[in-house]
Amino acid sequence: REYYKEPAALPKIEWASLKEDLARRDFTINTLAISLNPNEFGLLIDLFGGIKDLKERKIKVLHNFSFIEDPTRILRAIRYATKLGFVIEDDTIDLMRNTMKTGLFTDSRNTRMKEEFFTILRDKTITIPALRILKSLDGFKCIHRKLKYTERTEKLIKEAEKLMRKMEREVVLFERDKIILFLLISELNDFERKEVIKRWSMKENFINKESYYSDKQNELKETEEAYSIYRILEPLTLEEIVYLYAKGDKEIKNKIEKYLFELRKRKLHIGGKDLLKLGMKPSPEFSRILRIVRRYVIEGKLKTKKDELNFVKTLLEKGERHVFEKTT
């Protein structure tokens, strides 16, 4: 069986009877066991009313200190309820609220809390329903004491969901949990967001200052050129791009979709070796020439490797180096 030396600590394991072992489970529906004894093989053992709660589609803890022992169970209860379509029993809800008041739920040392929360954010089928339950429990303090889940926040998440569905269809890989967390903390100021990053042991460059994204939006609004759109968005992570999309207007959204599903797919076919074969000597000009060719590729003017090679050959034969100067 598992036992806890102190609240919110990792469980210790010791030998125990079957009943003692099952009594340490998180919820009654997880206390069901099947006998492997040859004389009783397949016998269903239900010592805590798990079958009844399973039939009634109910999430219920076994004892009053369940969430005190392991506050992570609060998030697990929410995840089970939303994923399985169950309801959390009233007394269990009260115990969850009482645990919130103890401060144990906000313990930043609890890495399992972070992982359980991210598990919820990764599952597109339960994210919003789960966040609504967490809001009803005043549970967003587990992220930051000033964080609020508002209608605006939910609207941003729904906007992000639209783009993420399209990205999934195009098999564009991204970290969904990071995107949702971006949006959840978007209403915090830069200092408060850094606090979240530090508490949850994330990389310092997890998210930039809000002014950085505002500048990107303004840059996008000021251009219609394909290559300019590409250059603005290319340095960003996919997660940041979805963040921009969720916060942007229709014009911003259209340009982001153009980048993700069109411009980003236009790849350069030639490289340094190809330039060597054309008789060029290795020099810093290589990268500049390839950058120019990439621009024409992004703009849709060069579509194949042959097109790209012919473009470079023509420029070299005519000695039109000024074209290189002009298009950088």
Image (cartoon, rainbow, N blue to C red):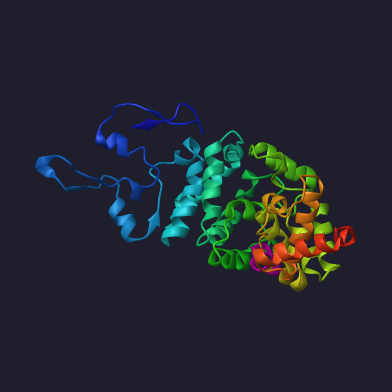
Tell me the quarter of the image containing the N terminus: top left
Along the viewing direction, whichever of 254 and 56 lies nearer the viewer: 254
Task: Identify whether 169 is placed above or below 188.
Answer: below
Residue 85 falls inside the magenta stretch: no
Along the viewing direction, whichever of 192 and 212 lies nearer the viewer: 212
| x, y percent for residue 110 | 56, 36
Residue 137 visible, this orientation: no
> Residue at the left extreme?
39
| Extent of the magenta region | 258-266
For the point 61% across and 68% down, which residue is it? Answer: 162
Q: Give the prevailing secondary structure in the magenta stretch.
A: helix
For the point 63% across and 66% down, which residue is it? Answer: 163
Residue 181 visible, this orientation: yes
| x, y percent for residue 290 | 75, 55
For the point 38% across and 44% down, which residue is it? Answer: 62
What is the tally of numbered marks visible in this picture?
Answer: 0
| x, y percent for residue 6 | 49, 28
Tell me the quarter of the image containing the C terminus: bottom right
- Residue 203 lies in what quarter of the image? top right
For the point 58% across and 68% down, which residue is it? Answer: 166
- Residue 4 lies in what quarter of the image? top left
| x, y percent for residue 27 | 38, 47
